Amino acid sequence: MTGLGRRLAALAACLLLLGAAPRRADEAAADAAPPGTLQQHNAALLQRLQQVHGLDDAAVQRIAAIFARSGFIGQGNPQVSRHPMNGAQCLAARAAAAVPKGDGVSARLCGGPHMAPLYDPQTQRAEDARACIDQYEFPDIPCEYPVVWVRAREAAQICAAMGKRLCDAHEWEGACQGRVLAPDYRFDLMRELPAGVAVSRQREAHNQARGDDKRWSYGPAYRSGVCATGSQKTPGCAGGGWSACGSNTYPVGAFPGCRSPLDVYDLNGNAAEHMNLPLTPSQMASRGSTELGVTEMKGSWFVFDAYRAHEDWCRWRAPYWHGSRVLDPASHANYHLGFRCCRTIGGR
């Protein structure tokens, strides 16, 4: 065990006395979220992250520093969050559906567990993929609760610490649709325009072009009860707020039927997700950009069966909600907003 691993293990042992038991590697604990502070929860989470993803001490220290600077990043405010499902229920649902573990062919292609190759099955094989996407919302560990209250900038930094990157919008959309197509960003409509105007013009053209091929991750029509969309908002929660709004999420991967044809889970429901929307070719993360574009919030969230606030079909692009540059230090964070990462493989 590494030095940092020993320190995290020691802290986790202390947390046992507080009721915050560490979880087995590669899956979450089989109990409800225990009481404790955000810092205690995060310390245990970092230990599991290192175990499952094989991170070295330097990577864990980078992620821990990002969490610490934020003061809010984690699995929600533990004092007000009330999760509708616990780890035991998640594990049971996955066992009943015989969900495969994340250490098979895809893990070998993608260079790590719980990732799925991004490709077009109509014209390619998985081996032809040039990128992979996390199967689950970060921390990308089955039956963990998703990490929320993270700014787009912080999400990009955490992905980089993991040896990954933030996904481009078309990659997320293709993962959901089951076919990753060539990028279709209308850079000609966005040239030298303010970001809000540029996003509005390109999204209108994109949504019009893709509207006849609507699909959700699980099928061709919207269905209630398939994904993690049946939770409730905290009473008194309006637009947001750390003390007022619990992150009443489900464990990731708890709904085996909420899976895309490329084996990616929770693209509908649970946490909404940060993504990179490039306004120029030089801002495409999939082509190696570290400049990045503007924020795009993808998917829906955990109360969507009761409150369908917007469209959420796979290739739908959202308005410029809380828009900013991805790397803006003040980019948006909220109780229902998380992320997942991509990784470039096999060259660009």
Image: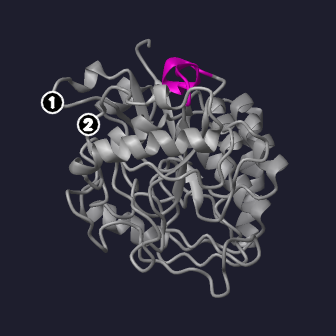
Q: Residue at x 34, y 31 (%)?
A: 117
- Tell which of 78 and 333 is nearer to you: 333
Q: Which residue is mark 2?
A: 179
Mark 2 or 1, nearer chain start:
1
Instruction: From the top left corner, tell me how far across and down residue 133 is, in percent.
Output: 43, 36
**Label 2's element?**
loop
Residue 100 seen in the current view: no
Q: Amino acid at mark 1?
A: Gln
Residue 2, placed above or below residue 95:
above
- Residue that sits furthest to the top in the current view: 347
Which residue is the site of mark 1? 122
Residue 161 lies in quadrant = top right
- Vertical placement of 55 versus 13: above or below? above
- Viewer-proximal residue, 172 or 296? 296
Residue 24, x across and y down, in percent = 53, 54
Disc 2 crowd rating (10 Å Cα; few below 14, some 14-19, many 20+) is many
Residue 288 is one of the magenta-drawn residues: yes
Q: Residue at x 72, y 47 (%)?
A: 331
Between residue 216 and residue 32, name the one nearer to us: 216
